[in-house]
């Protein structure tokens, strides 16, 4: 690991084996975690999907049992990696019981998402379901919700309500389509991104890392912002503190765009 890289942290991923669309086995999860650790990630909160309406009961028991096995294996394979369980809570009902503090990334912050990558008609009211229970909502992949580009003003509305914005690393280079890429880049340019996470699923084609985002930001000269987005702010959230505002970032014409042009000319 280069001396230029501070300890990175990843707060959105799916490594608990066999409980959602992420890692299928412990071996897959450990392989992915080793890759992250070797790339500079020292703290991971793994966040299986959990519908808010099922925030207690048998599903939680299943996830906890699988995580306990993963944690034991990780202690053997990667003893210096800090690994904890949190959840990506799908806000599928307007009024749900979310008082269990073990759901969160830390004591204050809860990773949440809207159902089926669709924005609800009353998104603020939906997010307030978590805020009313003393959570600071951390909205997963705001750039990916259908139609958010045409309703971009919602991003600031959410931020004004105290919601933390967690963008997927791979959105920066178009992994989720052009709209998500454009929204993510616009958010960065507006200083509207608080953290970047991987949404790593330990499966082929869904294994982008926060280190890739780090390299991308350094490639266009945003070293200080990269430290905030990928190291200091994620760690602050894990420790129950507020993230520091990130200055505007313009990705510019980096190596990915140049490569696309080169490939295009060769066809």
Image: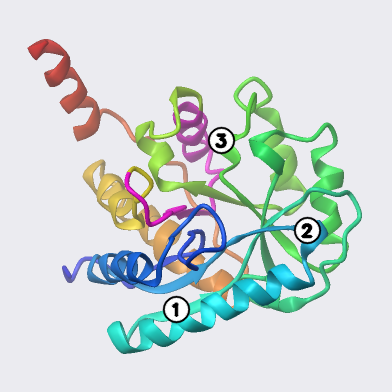
Asked whether residue 235 is in view, the answer is: yes
Q: Is residue 188 in the magenta section?
A: yes
Label 2: which secondary element:
helix
Q: Is residue 178 above or below residue 31?
A: above
**Which residues make up the magenta segment?**
180-204
Q: Is residue 2 left or right of residue 78?
A: left
The Cα–Cα distance between marks 3 and 2, rounded to whole angstroms, is 20 Å
The Cα–Cα distance between marks 1 and 3, rounded to whole angstroms, is 29 Å
Counting every numbered tag in the picture gives 3
Residue denoted by label 1: 70
Q: Is residue 25 above or below residue 258?
A: below
Q: Which labelled disc corresponds to residue 121?
A: none
Label 1: which secondary element:
helix
Q: Is residue 245 above or below residue 3?
A: above
Residue denoted by label 2: 52
Task: Give x and y (percent) for residue 78.
Answer: 30, 82
Task: Give x and y (percent) for residue 141.
Answer: 56, 44
Q: Is residue 103 in the magenta section?
A: no
Marks 3 and 2, the one that precedes in the sequence: 2
Residue at (23% x, 70% y) in the render: 38
């Amino acid at each position: 690991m280069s001396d230029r890289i501070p300890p990175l942290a990843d707060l959105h991923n799916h490594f608990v084996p066999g409980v959602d669309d992420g890692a299928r086995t412990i071996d897959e999860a450990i392989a992915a975690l080793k890759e992250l650790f070797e790339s500079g990630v020292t703290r991971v909160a793994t966040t299986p999907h959990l519908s808010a309406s099922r925030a207690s009961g048998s599903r939680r028991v299943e996830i906890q049992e699988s995580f306990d096995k993963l944690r034991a294996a990780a202690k053997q394979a990667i003893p210096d990696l800090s690994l904890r369980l949190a959840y990506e809570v799908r806000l599928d009902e307007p009024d749900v019981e979310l008082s269990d503090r073990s759901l969160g990334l830390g004591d204050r912050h809860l990773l949440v998402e809207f159902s089926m990558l669709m924005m609800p008609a009353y998104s603020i009211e939906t997010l307030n379901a978590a805020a009313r229970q003393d959570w600071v909502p951390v909205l997963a992949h705001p750039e990916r919700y259908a139609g958010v580009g045409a309703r971009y003003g919602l991003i600031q509305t959410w931020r004004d309500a105290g919601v933390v914005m967690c963008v997927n690393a791979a959105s920066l280079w178009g992994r989720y389509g052009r709209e998500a890429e454009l929204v993510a880049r616009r958010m960065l340019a507006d200083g509207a991104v608080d953290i970047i996470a991987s949404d790593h699923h330990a499966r082929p084609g869904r294994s982008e890392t926060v280190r890739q985002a780090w390299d991308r930001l350094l490639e266009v000269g945003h070293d200080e912002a990269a430290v905030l987005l990928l190291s200091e702010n994620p760690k602050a959230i894990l420790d129950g503190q507020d993230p520091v505002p990130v200055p505007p970032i313009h990705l510019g014409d980096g190596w990915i765009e140049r490569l696309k042009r080169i490939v295009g000319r060769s066809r």
